[in-house]
Image (cartoon, helix red, strand yellow):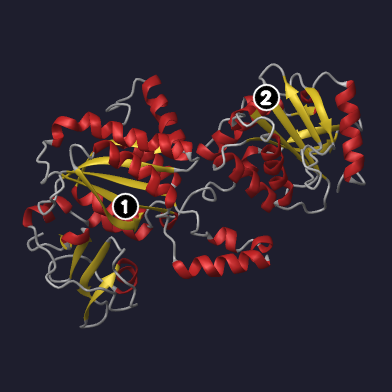
Amino acid sequence: MSLFTSEQQMQNWLSGQLDSLESLTELIVGQEIIEGFKPKDYAEARIVGSIKKVLSSLHHTIKISEDENITCSGTEVLRPDFVMFSPETESLVIVELKNLVSPSRQAGTELAAYSAGIRKFVPLLAEGDICHVLISSVWPTLLKHYARDQILWQGRNLLCLRPIELATSEIALAIVDPTEIAGNGHEHRLTHEQVGGYQICLYNYIKNVDLTQHENQLRAAIQLMANEGSRQRSHGFAYLWRDHACFSLAPYSITCMNIAPFVFTEEMLNEDEVANAPFFNKFYNVVHDFHPEGHGETLREISEIGSRFVENICDPRYEGFFPWDRHRMIMQSRAEKIAFVGWGIFGDLFYSELQKKYLSWGAVKDFMDPEIGDFAIDTLVETRSAIVIALDLTANPKKGRELNEFYASPPTSCDLCGKSLTNEKYFIDGKVNDSPMWANMCGQCHGACGVEIKWGRGQLYLNCGIEGWLKVGGFENQ
């Protein structure tokens, strides 16, 4: 139940407190909990960092406006509850109040509109110099999701507060628990389909240049790509790798991946406020018909920066327009990873982990260590299913490469469920349990209907992209 009968009453209360107190921080309880908070994952660490950043700008503030229109146009109205200036951090603080029974995403989207309105007067104002404070009587799941997305994906500094009544009957502001904003640890993670890109093959058969002598230039190219990704405020990553596939004419490749913004998660589709919006239904129906996978203008501009930087020593060609899981399979079977760069949230996590390695005197290949890049991606993108993990333990790619046995005429779909095998990591040519029949099975059907993988019972094949399906289990005399 709200402590205020109306939003206006909340506004009057906070206005009086700001006039009588030295700083807004005097109203905020639980700051010592935040100081001692130990984040369990990257999402919680980012949220706690955001809280501390905003709190540092609230120790001394000067009120600029209160419930006033901040636009320079008479037809447009933007009325933030409070706009303040922090002399200590040279930051603007925007405060929005909500006293609704069930505030929605609108409560948060108004903050973004206010910061955009202020930038009309201060066009060079960086996001790091704006602090957002959202005070709401209630914090339903939808509003928490919005706060999490603004902090994690938009890089905004946001402090979430709720009014509470103390034992003295005084009203204070409590910090919303960072674990509530972060969610269950999986909600902030991306699916493989939400990360799309392509392989930039660096051919050298025309220019006939030994690219091993130009690895520094190739590294600089992917660093430029990361700079462009950051400039565009996007999220993605790139690997530079040496291609050991015997059939490849490109000695090096760059795998460039970026967020696919039009791939919608079940979480968003299940939100009533989103799913029931007439505009979203039209929007989704149009976008869904074209199945966008993230190969848009942002990715093109990021990759072209790198391609142009190396075109004097090689001939870059764009191939393999796939989601991340497919590229991961391609690299797993043939890549010697040389370097990694990330931008947006991928870059933040990469450098955070790199710092930990250096401070603990851990083993670091270099400041573009691809193993740390692997860690960043596995943290942010959904990991393999339990079925794939089990098959990974069974597979022996090294022996498979030694024997070099590829399936002559591989199936295109699972014999049992009909699912396409194009994006599957494995399939099994094996015996069906309690039946004389054999079948080509996807991993899921094999787990439900197959027998053990061994000679005479079932063979395991690994998807090696255009190279074909390599036998990696069920060898003779195994």
**Quadrant of the frame with the C terminus:** bottom left
> Is 207 in front, or is 247?
207
| Residue 204 in view of the camera | yes
Q: Residue at x 20, y 64 (%)?
A: 460
Q: Which residue is mark 1?
A: 198
Q: Is residue 317 left or right of residue 471?
A: right
Residue 172 place in picture, x, y as percent: 83, 32
Q: Which residue is mark 2?
A: 91
> Is 467 in front, or is 304?
304
Q: Amino acid at mark 2?
A: Ser
Q: Amino acid at mark 1?
A: Tyr
Q: Residue at x 47, y 36 (%)?
A: 231
> Element under label 1?
strand
> Is 221 in front, or is 17?
221
> Element under label 2?
strand
Check the image and name the residue furthest to the bottom.
436
Q: Residue at x 55, y 35 (%)?
A: 46
Quadrant of the image occupied by residue 85 = top right
Q: Is residue 231 left or right of residue 390?
A: right
Residue 476 place in picture, x, y as percent: 8, 63
